[in-house]
Every structure is written in structure tokens, then in C-alpha cells.
Amino acid sequence: MTRLRQVSRADTDNELVHATYDRLFGPGRDPVAEPGTSTGTPGDWWTVFALVPDALRHASQGFGFYRSPRRLLDPLLRELGQTRAGWAKSSQFVFSQHCKSCRIVGMTEEMIAAIPNWSIADCFTPVQRAVLAYTDCLVLQGGRVPDAVFDALREHLSDEEILELTYITMLYDMHAVISRALRLEWDDRDDPIVEIAAPEGFVSFDVGAAIAMPEQG
């Protein structure tokens, strides 16, 4: 369940919220009472963002930005960055949704399956590998990009394309983090890293000391 409350249609008179609900869920439908989008997601990303209509508008403008026909960046390269960002930030929602988008822009099933282990896959072109390496520097290294990685990117992309790639990838880094923090959509799941209970009757002890090799005398 989401960590923030959702906004029912009857709870707001904001025109943007109502128009968004109509477009995504159907005219007049209350997505809190009747959740579910055409892509199979619960749709609670939208109903939570509706808490702050300005945030919903700002985020929607970001979606419009990357889909605009004015973009110079190849959509396939864009989706590589977005999908890898979702995987790297452990967002089931962003990764799953953009795997679907990858197919729309013509990515093969082999390539989609290889995104988690791209560094040892041979199905990517040099420019695609450069985009994936750069994406990892953005989302896993906090923007710490070695010159060699950036130089590889510049062999194939213009300055304008690199700026678009950087902005769009980091937009989805943000969405991945928000979705996990607020438990939205497919990121409404418990953290899998937990303590596993010991067998009944187990007596606590110092694991490090128990496995340490004895000194040789």
C-alpha cells in the first residue's frame, strides 16, 4: 500500500487532475475506488502525485519533454538509459514499464534481457554500450564519469544529444527513487534484504570468531 494517501476524484476539483484521470483511467472513473491502468499497473503513481497538482503538472511536462518530436536523441538510446536506470536503482516499476517501451522503439528481446548484464553482452553496438556505461556513471556513481566513458559517448553523440540523454536518464533515476520511497505501483513491496531467522535453539555467538582460522604454531 502506498505510504501517502491517494486522491479520489471526488476529493479534488483540480482540472488537471480530473483530465489526467479521464485520460488514463476513463471518463468519470475514480482510480482510487477502481484502480488499474491499460498497462496493468495499479495507477497509484498518479493518484498520489495528485496530492500536489503542481508536482503532477511538472512531472507530466517531463514525460512530454522526452516524447517530443523535437528531441534529437535516438529513442532506442533514450530507453536504454531509462530502463538501465530503473534496474540500477532497483525500481521494479520503472524497469518493467520501460522494458515494454523498449519493444515499442524496436529493441530486440535479446537486448532487453541483457540490460541487467550489459557489460558482458555482445548484442549492443558501440554507441549503445557507451550509453549504458554513461548511465551507470550517472545513477550508480552519482555523476562521476571517467574521461574514457565520456569520450566514447562523444564519438557518437552531439553535445545536444548528450544533454538530452543526461537529463532524461536522471529524470528516471528520480522517478525510480520516488517510486521506491513511497511504495508506488510495482515498487509497493517489502525490502528483500532482511535477517533470516536461525534454527530453533540457536545460541548467538560471534560469527567472525567462529570461522576465523586458528593460528599456526
Image (tube, helix red, strand yellow):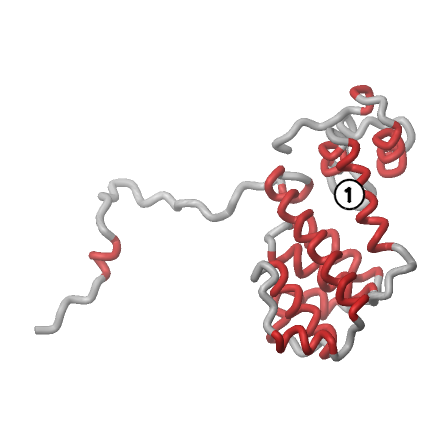
Is residue 18 or residue 194 the one in the foreground? Answer: 18
Comparing 162 with 79, the one in front is 162
| Dot 1 amino acid type | Ala
Question: Up-down: is 152 above or below 113?
Answer: below
Q: Position of residue 180 (x, y in %)?
A: 61, 44
Residue at image point 80% right, 46% down: 39
Residue at the image point whose x is 85% and y is 22% from the top: 13
| For residue 28, above or below residue 123 | above
Q: Nearer the viewer, residue 20 or 194?
A: 20
Question: The residue tagged with tag 1: helix, strand or loop?
Answer: helix
Within 10 Å of disc 1 (Cα), the crowding (few <14, some 14-19, many 20+) is some
For image coordinates 25% across by 57% down, the residue present is 208
Q: Quadrant of residue 156?
A: bottom right
Relative image position of residue 199 (x, y in whole percent): 31, 44
* Figure quadrant of residue 128: bottom right
Q: Where does label 1 land, which residue? A: 59
